[in-house]
Image (tube, grey):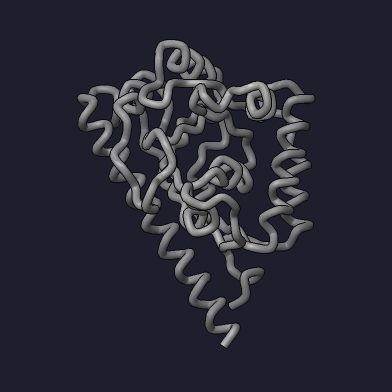
Amino acid sequence: MSLSQDPAFSVNPAVRRRKTIELKPGTDRSRLSLGWYRYVQSFSMQLTMLSGIRATGRENIPKEGGVLLISNHLSHFDVFVLALLVPRPLNYVARSSLFNPVLGPFIRSIGAFPIQRDGVGAQGMKESLKRLRSGCIVTFFPEGTRSSDGRLAALKPGIAALASRAGVPVVAAGIAGTFESWPRTARFPRPHPVHVHYGQPVPFAELENLPSDKVISLLHLRLEESVAVARERLDRTLCRSTQSDA
């Protein structure tokens, strides 16, 4: 079966573009800001066309209301990969060192805001809760930094405090393929297929009364499950590609 026939995701550029630009403005940003976000989303989509990006489980992302979207972190590409196939605009929690005079204005323009690398911090927590409680999707990489070996690392304790106070469901997304495309040890990226799997939401009711270590364990488990699905789907794609080239 070809990529375009796979029900997980159509690679038809026209279909992708239509889904991106015909959406109504969200409630978490102005029409102008949303238009810019959609432009960056569409442009990034075109850049990934050659290598291929696919997703499963997008129906697990609530269509409205606040959502805490957590993901493993393999590459600089991850921020864009998570947003490409999600109809709702994403907000991003990013380490404060990225908000320099060159990069800072751009990442703010697509919904990023700063936190400390080793913890959410008071200001980061306040801004995260504000956006979540106003009905936004906030994206968080709970490992704190990109993986050095492609495997899921321990989660930073800040995710437990945020998930326990937010009052919103948590969706764990697993990414596979971006480490092979652009690991932190490489200066330049190379084309490689990518798969993202969005797991079923963890209701806030399952988190609010748990101690921090249990919250972290549960979220780590959900991330492991989503990463495993993404990896398995990516391996299928690579296998089909190898067979078609034979």
Image quadrant containing the N terminus: bottom right
| Residue 41 or residue 170, whichever sits in front | 41
In the rendered image, is residue 14 in sight?
yes
Residue 109 vertical placement versus 38 (above, below): above
Residue at x-position 63% and y-position 62%: 51
* The furthest residue to the bottom: 246
Residue at x-position 56% and y-position 62%: 193
| Residue 180 or residue 128, whichever sits in front | 180
Residue 121 vertical placement versus 139 (above, below): above
**Residue 231: x %, y % from top left:** 42, 60
Direction from residue 181 to residue 225 in the image, left or right: left
Direction from residue 67 to residue 2 in the image, left or right: right
**Residue 22: x %, y % from top left:** 77, 41
Image quadrant containing the C terminus: bottom right
In the rendered image, is residue 28 in sight?
no
Residue 188 vertical placement versus 146 (above, below): below
Res 119 quadrant in image: top left
Residue at x-position 55% and y-position 30%: 92
Residue at x-position 51% and y-position 72%: 238
**Residue 102: x %, y % from top left:** 68, 27
Res 10 quadrant in image: bottom right
**Residue 220: x %, y % from top left:** 30, 41
Direction from residue 202 to residue 27 in the image, left or right: right
Residue 39 vertical placement versus 52 (above, below): above
